[in-house]
Amino acid sequence: MESKLIIIRGNSGSGKTTTAKRLQNYLGRGTLLVSQDVVRREMLRVQDREGNLSIDLIRQIAAYGKDKCEFIIVEGILYKKRYGEMMNYLIQFYDHKAYTYYFDLSFEETVARHNSRGKKMEFGEDSLRAWWNSNDYLNVDGEMILTNDMSQDDVLKLILNQLQA
């Protein structure tokens, strides 16, 4: 089996988790979804700081999927400064059979998307602004930039077309 790694990143509220879950549902059983929020906040309960324990655990879980799962999705804010080395490792580990996507939305669009979801009561615009990190590209070959004018359906179609190419 030839495993494919899919990395979906972007600011809080941009649509990463929604996209990753829809993609997993479409790709079907055996698709491994590694969510930064689940690993960091639920499994380990650690703060998102330099060198936090979730970085290595995300790497280990994603590496576990190689040759066991056809698709491995890693999704989260995944700031390049903290997680970049780990993501570059995974891209190489997967023999460059990796697809990287970055939600590069305006702050206003991110707030609008955040306000349309269930989590809108957990935190608001002030928190989004405090966490905001624009243009946090990995700058790896093939990195796709997802923009304001792309709907969830557009993003899903783009990813699926690339996986089938």
Image (spheres, rainbow, N blue to C red):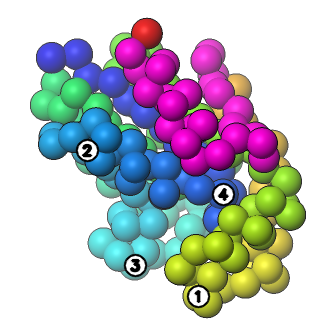
Residue 59, by quadrant, is top left
Binning the other alpha carbons within 10 Å of mark 2 as few (below 14), some (14 to 19) or many (20 upward) gives many
Q: Which residue type carries mark 2?
A: Leu
Name the residue at 31% across, 40% down. 26
Asked whether the beta carbons under mark 1 and mark 3 sit within 8 Å of each other, the answer is: no
Q: Nearer the viewer, residue 32 or 117?
A: 117
Residue 21 % position (x, y): 38, 53
Give the Cα separation between the discs numbered 4 and 3.
23 Å
Q: Tell me the mark number nearer the camera, choosing from 2 and 4.
A: 4
The Cα–Cα distance between marks 3 and 2, rounded to whole angstroms, is 21 Å
Q: Residue at x 42, y 74 (%)?
A: 41
User: Where residue 120 appears, x then y in whole percent?
Assistant: 63, 82
Magenta residue span: 140-164
Quickly name the residue at label 3. Answer: 45
In this picture, residue 100 sits left or right of residue 160: right
Vertical relation: 162 (above or below) 114: above
Q: Is residue 145 magenta?
A: yes
Q: In 3D space, how far apart are the residues under numbered discs 1 and 3 (Cα atoms)?
A: 17 Å
Q: Which residue is mark 2?
A: 32
Q: Nearer the viewer, mark 3 or mark 2?
A: 2
| Element type at mark 3 | loop
Q: Amino acid at mark 3?
A: Arg
Residue at (66% x, 57% y) in the render: 14
Q: Earlier in the sequence, mark 2 or mark 4?
A: 4
Q: Please state which amino acid type lies under the numbered disc 1.
A: Glu
Dots 1 and 4: beta carbons under 8 Å?
Answer: no
The label on residue 122 is 1
What residue sits right under mark 4 in the picture?
A: 14
- Cβ–Cβ under 8 Å for marks 4 and 3: no
Q: Is residue 35 visible?
A: yes
Residue plotted at (73% across, 84% down): 124
Q: CA distance from mark 1 to mark 2?
A: 27 Å
